[in-house]
Amino acid sequence: MTILNKIIKADDAEPGYDTLIYGKSGTGKTTFFSTYPGPRLLIDCNEGGIESLRGTDTDTISCGSFEEVDTVITALEKQDFAYDSIALDTVSNIQQMCVSMYAKKYKKKDFSIKDWNIISQLMKDILYRFLDLPCISVLIAQERVFEPRETESNSAITIYPYRSAALQPALESAMTAAVDIVLRADAFVNNRSHVTEDSTGRRVPKELKTTCFRIQLRSDEYNIAKVRSARDAHVPFYQMDPSFNKLHFIITGEK
Ligand SMILES: Nc1ncnc2c1ncn2[C@@H]1O[C@H](COP(=O)(O)OP(=O)(O)OP(=O)(O)O)[C@@H](O)[C@H]1O
Ligand SMILES: [Mg+2]
């Protein structure tokens, strides 16, 4: 038996579903998680973001500090596994908690580059442990625009501003690479006009505004997104009214 016995055909490998989903507030990130395979657990670090999970049969546990998130993940590592999908909502808030914890512990107001590197490492450690849990791990993040840094703008490669998960740059690139799926949640208003009758029976035009929810599945020059699938699988740019089942169908071709 050698290490090479671990070689398998790429065709036989199970697709992975660990996901990073980012987007502005109210774009449907938490709701999208409620379509992932159950039993589901959402670790809520969002102060109130769980209202949209009502009626979806999702367990929730609320964490108010970095230490609490750490304790919950440690407990999940030890338990006989009860969940098929677990989300951290939001990793942007957990990063904020990590910064507060570090500032309090070392009584610091201003951080050096070394401090930021330590914070980034603390976050990486906890998030890699979370991604290693034997279930589908979902990282939910707020969105931010990354501006190219000075050194990058002088380099041979042109880097444009782009939108991605609101995390420190080193953490954003590490998490984007670590997960199988990166999605951008987005909502927009659709105006439709139709004709109705008023109280006198007169036909009048009426504007109907509906909010549409979608996720972006592929990168463009401004937004990071990825879905790992076979090269010839058809991955659309957007999925309207998104759900895990629709995503699963795109990845595997199975209904
Ligand atoms: N696909 C959808 N169809 C209809 N309504 C939706 C859909 N997705 C989300 N909503 C509604 O939009 C609102 C915001 O959704 P949700 O809380 O999931 O957003 P969020 O991105 O998690 O926001 P936040 O960042 O503030 O936590 C909720 O009222 C939710 O019910
Ligand atoms: Mg939410």
Image (cartoon, rainbow, N blue to C red):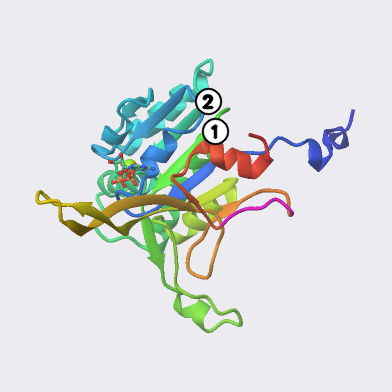
Relative to 22, 37 lies left or right:
right
Q: Which mark is residue 169?
A: none
Based on the picture, tell me whether residue 71 belongs to the magenta stretch.
no
Viewer can see residue 59? yes
Report the side of 254 relative to 161 (left or right): right
Task: Identify the image quadrant of residue 75.
Answer: top left
Residue 9 percent location from the top left of the image: 84, 39
Q: Please, what secondary structure does the residue beneath circle 1 have? A: strand
Q: Quadrant of the C terminus?
A: top right
Q: Give the residue drawn at x 38%, y 25%.
A: 58
Q: Earlier in the sequence, mark 2 or mark 1?
A: 2
Q: Is residue 89 above or below residue 219?
A: above
Image position of 128 (left or right of 251): left
Q: Nearer the viewer, residue 236 or 143?
A: 236
Q: Whole-percent x and y of residue 185?
A: 42, 52
Residue picked out by circle 2: 84
Q: Amino acid at mark 1?
A: Ile
- Distance from the alpha carbon under mark 2 to that under mark 1: 6 Å
Q: Residue furthest front?
A: 201
Q: Residue at x 38, y 22 (%)?
A: 57
The rendered magenta stretch, by its main secondary structure, is classed as loop
Which corner quadrant of the image does residue 140 belong to?
Answer: top left
Badge 2 element = loop
- Asked if marks 2 and 1 touch (Cβ < 8 Å), the reply is yes
Residue bounds of the magenta highlight: 232-236
107 on left or right of 231: left
Q: Is residue 126 visible?
A: no
Any mark on residue 136, and which? 1
Mark 2 crowd level (few <14, some 14–19, many ≥20, 10 Å Cα): some
Crowd tier of the residue under label 1, counting other residues whose Cα lies within 10 Å: few below 14, some 14–19, many 20 or above: many
Split into 4 quadrants, where in the image is the N terminus?
A: top right
